[in-house]
Image (cartoon, rainbow, N blue to C red):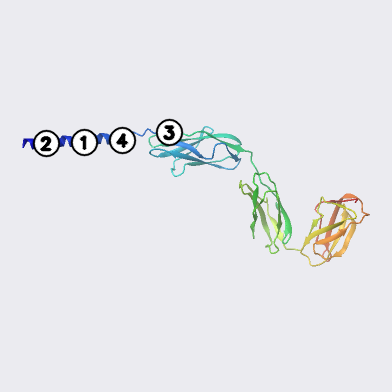
Amino acid sequence: MFKKLMVFLFVMIAFTGIFISCSDDDDSSTGPDTSAPTVWVAAPADSFEVIDGIPVTITAGVSDNVGVTKVEFYVDSILASTDSVPSVFEYIWGTVGKEGDHIVYLYAYDAAGNVGESEVITITVTPPQTLTVNSPNGSETWNRGTLQNITWNVNTVDTLVRIELMGTAGYILSASTANDGLYEWQIPADQVPANDYMIKITGLQTTISDTSNSTFTITDSPFIQVMSPNGGESWAMSTDQTISWQDNLTEDVKIELFKGAALELTISDSTVSDGSYSWSIPNNLSVGSNYKIRITSIPVNTVTDQSDATFSITAK
């Protein structure tokens, strides 16, 4: 009996020792958190360049043994933003008026107050760029069925732009066209006439855009539009040249040559309004640079148009 009691006590002591030993191990594994988070600028990359006016999304990359509770975003050593939403730590930095180099770094915090600091990156804000619609820019009247030039400046890095017609029956004229400052638009013959149209042009890379300053009109009233010579051409005497125009007329037209404000020559008293006339330039004209062509509807002399600017007639 005594031996059985001794064995029982020995087993209990041994079991208790194991329990105490396990408890000690558990206590040591739940000690205080002293590990600082790791944080880095995930985007943009170092030496990133952005055009003045285009916002930059600064995104933090983080890692921690427990979890990051917030990230602070510093721009030029000034706290710019604090993000405590752990799904994506980010800050959208506005660049308007901030041309030049800027340093960016981050601090990340965990629940225990440990702090990690990122390496510094540089963001360079380049000079501002603009895109300006020049024509149509307001108050123009364009006839449907005509070919018109949409023009704009090209002071952006965009290689392509989108051109939109805004207004009563607006649509995208071109989803992607060269950013060369000129787009020839053949206005559809069935375009809805209205006086509330505007043109919007947007750079596909920078998203910089501009819209006509005010509205222009598309109409279906009778018209003539001289296309060539329309200014700047140099035509020699004794050569054949093509006078071209657009109209929506069924009646014949008259073609005249003006030198300055004076009528120099009636080229044709009456010709079919088909948009083209072959002119053999006589050799008895005066050499000069102030010539214009005027084309007029014969039955309705108020329907007329002339060259936008002067052209030259030279000796052969």
- Indicate which label's residue lies in the foreground, 1 or 2: 2
Location of mark 1 (residue):
18
Q: Earlier in the sequence, mark 2 or mark 3?
A: 2
Q: Give the quarter of the image for residue 6.
A: top left
Observer-nearest residue: 113 or 29?
29
Q: Which element carries disc 2, helix, strand or loop?
A: helix
Q: Nearer the viewer, mark 2 or mark 3?
A: 2
Distance in Å between CA atoms under marks 3 and 1:
39 Å
Viewer-nearest of labels 1 and 4?
A: 1
Depth check: give the residue in front, 86 or 136. 86
Residue pointed to by mark 4 = 29
Kind of residue sitting beneath label 1: Ile
Residue underneath mark 3: 115
- Of the image marks 4 and 2, the number of the one nearer the N terminus: 2
Q: Residues within 10 Å of mark 2 (few under 14, many from 20)?
A: few
Taking the spot 16% from the left edge, 34% from the top edge, the residue there is 13
In 3D space, how far apart are the residues under numbered discs 1 and 4 (Cα atoms)?
17 Å
| CA–CA distance in space, label 2 to label 3 | 56 Å
Q: Residues within 10 Å of mark 4 (few under 14, many from 20)?
A: few
Sequence-earlier tag: 3 or 4 = 4
Residue 118 point in image, percent of width and height: 48, 34
What kind of element bears circle 4?
Answer: helix
Q: Position of residue 247 (x, y in %)?
A: 77, 62
Q: Which label lies toward us, 3 or 1?
A: 1
Q: Residue at x 50, y 34 (%)?
A: 105
Crowdedness of circle 1 by 10 Å Cα count: few (<14), some, many (20+)? Answer: few
Amino acid of disc 4: Ser
Residue 302 shows in this picture: no
Q: Are marks 3 and 4 in contact (CB under 8 Å)?
A: no
- The residue labelled by disc 2 is 7
**Residue 25 can be seen in this image:** yes
**Separation of residues labelled 4 and 2 (CA atoms):** 34 Å
